[in-house]
Amino acid sequence: MTNTQSNTIVFDDVSKFYGEILGVNRVNLTIAPGITSLVGPNGAGKSTLMNLMTGLLKPSRGAISILGTSPDRPDELFQKVGYCGGFDSFPPGVTGAEFISMYLSVHGFSRSRIEELTLKALERVGLLEAGNRKVAAYSKGMRQRVRLAQSIAHEPSVLILDEPLNGLDPMARAETIDLFRTIAREGLHLIISSHILQEVDMMSDAVVLLNNGYIVAEGDIHEVRDEMDDHPIQVLIRCNRPGYLAARAFEENIIVEAKLLDDRYGLLIRTRDPDRFHLALNRIVVEGDIEIETVASVDSDLNAVYQYLIGSEGSSI
Amino acid sequence: MSAATEAVQTQQGATARPWRHWLRQVAAIMRLEIRRSLFGKRATLIYLLAVLPVLIMLMLALFGTERTWTKTVTDGHGNVTSQSTMSRSGPMKDPATASVVFAGLFEGLIVRTVIFFGCAWIFMNLFRGDIVDRSLHYYFLAPVRREVLVCGKYLSGAVGSVLLFGAATAGSLFFFYYARGYSASAQFIFGGPGLKQIISYMAIAVLGCLGYGAFFLLIGLFFRNPIIPALLIYGWEWLNFLLPPFLKKISVIHYLTSLAPVPISRGAFAIVAEPTSAMFAIPGLLIVTIAVLAIACWRIRGLEISYGVD
């Protein structure tokens, strides 16, 4: 086992079929430490990839290595992996603390250690006071948090989280994202699936974009954007003379599309050559005596990237 | 000591002394499962089932020995014209008849009904219950070999069923001997075949739990709706007395009844087969149980869980 293998998650030509239905196909992927988000619409293959990583599903073809361990070895794998699945289910009748401690007991920890780890996990997700209440009486957000606590209780090196922010209120969402960042700073792998692109944008070091079981793009969000040279990027400009600016830009042949916003102060343009556009923009602004309020790249957010890559509106993902 | 350090130590311990580590994990799984199967709300039915033969034996002990009553005849004015004392001997009065009655009750009620359905409920729920509750993945996401999980779950079911149905058998035997009175029972147990019979009945109950338990655990792993295969097995076991000798041997009940200390009549249509001796019946049942558990281990190694949609 090489040093790289022992510190990365590797999918080597992995496919998964459910009978004749494709789950994921020919996935080759290497995930480094940090926060990696799996993004895609329903049926894209996000949960399939996560379940393959944790051995809940077996690949039809290919091999997976989690820090050098195969998912076929749960006794070794789950010493270092924690998984918070997307399913909101619990053993009947348990309290939050019992839910965490009962599965810690299977690890082989001592009783005092189980108690200590349970309290620590509950504290990390802000459920210390509610720990002795039945899970059945928890709100959806609390259930989400106690599942998160259960997955981090044994302090794993790899944390796999399926839609971990679902059901959380804005405050809990912000706290949970902070918790993820803290965990990632400790050198852990965090693999998160989400369809809320804004959150993915906020917290991810890398993204894996999936559609219909295939990886559409992967890497740093900005690198992914750079891969799409053929696609025009969008720039939003707020100024006092948007009509003039649009006309001049067309004359210079540096944009392919311009859209005047309803408030008459905003202009959304699409260009294939952003460097040339920005140079020309300076000249046009000076020549036309235009007062610029904002120039912002709209495409650097994941929503736009996704829209380009799979031809789907980000908001509908 | 951090969790990571303790996890590393646990891992090192597991590598150096895997059996000790596995035993610790089996014990942990057993604690969780026994608590759930014996002390949960779902256990109420099992308790009712287990107490049924004890109540029937209690009734037989109280009312099935000898009944005496006085018959009085009066005229139209209420004057007694004749009075006679009558008595009727119950099935528990005569020791030989009582033994046969108990043997029939033990096989028909305790083994074929209480242990069969009790084990079906307990063992099929070990995995199927988790799948229905959608909580099996929590075990699959723990650092435990799936074979160890099968062992832990099976042993928890075995302990629970042996405790419950062993107690039901012991309770039934208690009232069986209570009906005879202390001195006759003591004489029968310590001076006659009573002690051997008690041991045989208890052994049959334990072996029944182990054998049926393994089959039902396997059924719970293979079938989404395990009731139909369980009923098919029930039918096969009930019709066993009608089967030709070689088919009789493909059943649990054949080996259990071979160990019965008091033979019972199976009716005119029964096909008689030579009972299997205890020397072969007991190890044979245990070997079959282990083989069934090995299939369960093979099955669970390939078992996939997929909750929700992508």
Image: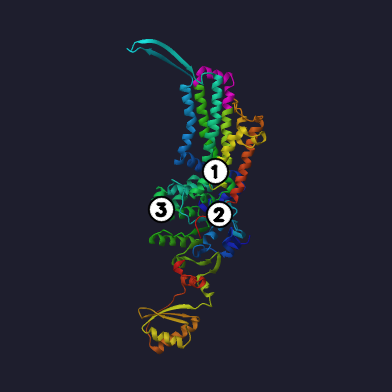
| Image: B225 above or below A220 | above
Which kind of residue does numbered mark 1 sit on?
A: Ile
Disc assigned to residue A127? 3
Relative to B46, say whether A88 is above or below: below
* Whole-percent x, y for residue A192 in the image: 49, 61
Name the kind of residue labelled 3 in the image.
Leu
Instruction: Give the structural element (helix, strand or loop) at label 1.
Output: helix
Comparing marks 1 and 3, which lies closer to the viewer? Answer: 1
Residue type, label 2:
Leu
Q: Position of residue A281 (x, y in %)?
A: 44, 85
User: Which label is found at residue A56?
Assistant: 2
Helix, strand or loop under label 3: loop
Question: Is B304 or A28 nearer to us in this picture?
Answer: B304
Q: Nearer the viewer, residue B9 or B107?
A: B107
For label 1, count other residues whose C-alpha is less than 10 Å away and answer few (under 14), some (14-19) or many (20+): few
User: How far apart in space, not on screen, are marks 2 and 1 (Cα)?
Assistant: 27 Å
Within 10 Å of the Cα at label 3, are there few (<14), some (14-19), or many (20+) other Cα atoms? many
Look at the numbered discs 2 and 3 and tell me whether their residues touch, using CB distance below 8 Å.
Answer: no
Local crowd at mark 2 within 10 Å, few (<14), some, or many (≥20)? many
Q: Is residue A264 above or below residue A133?
A: below
The part of the chain drawn in magenta is B179-199
Task: Say which residue label 1 marks.
Answer: B228
Q: Which chain carries label 1?
A: B
| Residue A185 visible in this rendered orientation of the protein | no
